[in-house]
Each structure stands twice: as structure tokens, then as C-alpha cells.
Image (cartoon, grey):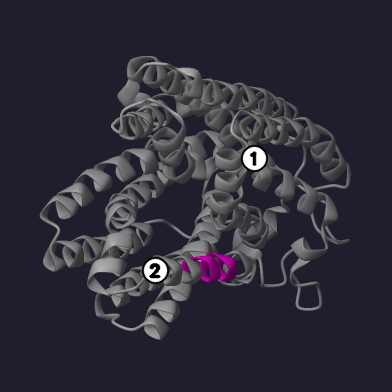
Amino acid sequence: MGFIRIVPPGGPARTLALAQLTNSVGDGAYYVCSVLYFSRVVGLGPTHIGAALTLGWALGAVAGVPLGHLADRRGPRGIAILMSVATGLAVGSFLFVRSYPAFLVAVCAYTCCQCGLGAARQALLAGLVEPARRTETRAYLQSTVNAGLALGAALGGIALRLDTEGAYLTALAADGASFLVAALVLSRLRPPTGAAATAGQGGPGMGQGGPSLTVLRDRPYALVSLLNMIMLLYMPLLSVVLPLWIVERTEAPSWTVSALLVVNTVGVVLFQVRMAARVRDLPSASRALRHAGLVLLAACACFALSATGTTAWTAALLLLAAACVQVLGEMLLGSGSWEIGFALAPPDKQGQYQGFYGAGTAVARLIGPLLLTTLILSGGTLGWLLLGALFLTAGLAMGPAVRWASGRGAAGAAPGVVIEEPRKLRRPTP
């Protein structure tokens, strides 16, 4: 039953999942090895690496919108293949970087291509999958990505164990090759039909005389994207904040960090699709975001309690319980967020809208580590509670924001945009 819930049905959804699985395995190895490669092999200091990544993700957040718009104009399938190849080449360039200026250029190319690939893939999903199945398909893809990252991280762990230049080079080369293989997989997909196919060819709302980047003038969608970005600040918790919290503020053993990552990965792989089945339309998506805010507040309170554990086992058990609560909130957030991001975008402008919506991920990666480490490591329990209150506030505000956006007709689309008729959504087949 778990296998059925992880693997999507045959057709475009399964091909998209295979492409995501392919490059997520490479990404898992990259995430584990890249920082040590940049420091030990390339010879860069932590400050230089951090500054380059900050600049890169900032540029990526900006580049996602025009690259998504390009997918609308030229077709998401071709742009997704192009961005996948470009990302693979950008990763490959790390193998030859031996100076900081070259590293800076390579990082910016990598992050921009990654954000463009994300926007194009989302537009491709919207063009190939019927609206009632998009959130379900996105949940399958998320489960696939987590499984691939876990496998890639295990492979990257071998490189860390060997701790040689050759091992690090092999891990990065595998990541670059994985994007090239993913491009081949994407080439098996047929081009989308309907609104996605007519964009840029005189189609609805995208004629030569129409506005180009409508999303930049869409205030309701911008508000929804901002609230989503705030809730995405949970992302640096497991990778950055909690390792420091465990070492500095709790009695838990260091292996607890790995245990929390396993809980998160296994939870998403096994239960994300089932969680997404609860979201069928905008009202249920808003409700999922509201519940996500409540659950993430509870998770923050549980993480704060871990500092009160007087023994290693007590602290570890509190942290594991908090991780279970946190992954529930993460899955609720993903399920509601995907439905909102797709449903509020005009059908012929999914690329630019997904690029804008997806910028929240890049921004969370950009500001999250510094913001959350400062808030939590300095504030302790109060910092955790303030973060939880922030999640709750954003979750509660999402409902009114979604009603504002949906009341303007597909996120305040410009005159002349053809809006899809309301549709009856059905639950995915178990």
C-alpha cells in the first residue's frame, strides 16, 4: 500500500516523478558533499561560501519569474529540458572552479537555473495534468524527491567517509549527470495542449500587445506568496537550526540530528500523498494552511521543551516527538500551498506565476538560516514560541488572502484572460 502511495499512476505524472527522482538522487549527494568540497578542495572560507550562496539564491529568486514567463511563451516542456541541461552544466562547472570569482559565477548560474527549472516543471505539470489531479501529482513528486534525496545523501556519505578529492569530484559529477538524465526523461513527455500550448501565440491574455509579467502587478497573489514564504521558513529548521540547538541547548546525543532527518524523510515519503487527498479545492487548501499553522506552533513548543530534558534519552525523545509534529505540519502546508499556487494562477501564465510563487523557497533558503538561528539560539524558548506564532499568524491569514485573490478571478488576471470554469474536483483513487 505504501508503494502504491509513493509511485504515481502511469502517464505524464509518472514520467515527471522519474525525472524528479533522477536528479534528486544527485542533489542528495550534492547537499551532503558540496560545502566540504568547496572548503577543502577549492580552498574557500565559510564566509566566502555563505556570501556566494546568499547572492546566488537572491538572483535565483528574481530569475524564476522571467524564466517561468519564457516557459509560458515558448512552451514549458522545452524550457524544462533546457533548464535541466543548464543546471547539469552549472553543477559540472564546479569541478573546474579553483578561484572565488569563478565560484561566484558558477553558484549564480546554478541557482538561477534551479529556480528556472522549478518554474518550468510546475508549468509543465499544470499543462499535462488535469486541474483536479495537480495537488495529488505534486504530492507524489514531493514523496519521490524526498526518497531520492535520502538515497543521494547515503551515497554522499560514502564520499564523506572517503574524504578525498576524487570522492568529492565523483559526487558532484554524478549530480551534474543526473540533471542530464532528467532532461532525457522529460523529453519523453508530449508538449502540453490547451492554454499552456497557446501561450505566446496569440492565446488568451498573452497576445503580442498584452502585458508580459502580469504576476508582478497582481497584489492578491503577491500577498498569498508572501504568506506562503513565511510558512516556508520551517525549511532551515532540520538542516541548520536544530543541529545547533541540540548541541548548544539540549542533553541529546549528536546522532539525534540524523534521527530527525530520517523521521522527516520517511514521514513525507509515506504519508504526503494521503495528506494531499484531503485538499480538493481552495477552501480545503486554506483550511490545510490554517491547520498547518497550528501544528507548526505546537512543533515549535515541543522543540522548546527539549531543552528541559535532564537526560540524553529524555531530550532525544522530546526532539523525536517534536519532529513527528513538525513533519505533519510540513505535509499540511505542502498540500494546501500547492493547490493555492496552481488554482490562483491564470491557466496560460502558470510559468511566471509558479516562478513567483516558488521564489518563496529561494527566499526562505536565503534569509531563513540567519533569521532562525538568531531568533532561536538567542531567544531560547521565547524564540521558539515567537517563530510558532509567526507560523500561526501566516496560516490564519491565508484564508482571507485566498478569498481576496479568488474574488478577482484567477488572481486578478488582466482583462481578456480566459478563466477556467469552476470544476468539480474528485478524490484521488486510493
Q: Secondary structure at mark 2?
A: helix
Tell me what residue is drawn at x 88 percent, y 61 percent.
415
Residue 157 horizontal/vertical position (percent): 20, 47
Pointer 1 residue:
231
* 322 vs 86: above or below: above
Q: Callout 1, which amino acid?
A: Met
Q: How busy is the neighbourhood of tag 1: few (under 14 within 10 Å), some, or many (20 plus)?
A: many
Pointer 2 residue:
87
- The answer to whether residue 66 shows anywhere in this view is yes
Tell me what residue is drawn at x 31 percent, y 44 percent.
148
- In three-dimensional space, the C-alpha distance between marks 2 and 1, rounded to whole angstroms, equals 27 Å
Task: In the rendered structure, find residue 266 and report the number of the disc placed on it.
Answer: none
**Bounds of the magenta segment:** 53-60
Residue 328 horizontal/vertical position (percent): 52, 24
Closest to the observer, 131 or 50: 50
For residue 414, side relative to residue 207 (left or right)? right
For the C terminus, the image quarter is: top left
Q: Secondary structure at mark 1?
A: helix
Q: Quadrant of residue 204?
A: bottom right
Mainly helix, strand or loop, the magenta region?
A: helix
- The answer to whether residue 82 shows anywhere in this view is no
Tell me what residue is drawn at x 82 percent, y 40 percent.
401
Q: Callout 2, which amino acid?
A: Thr
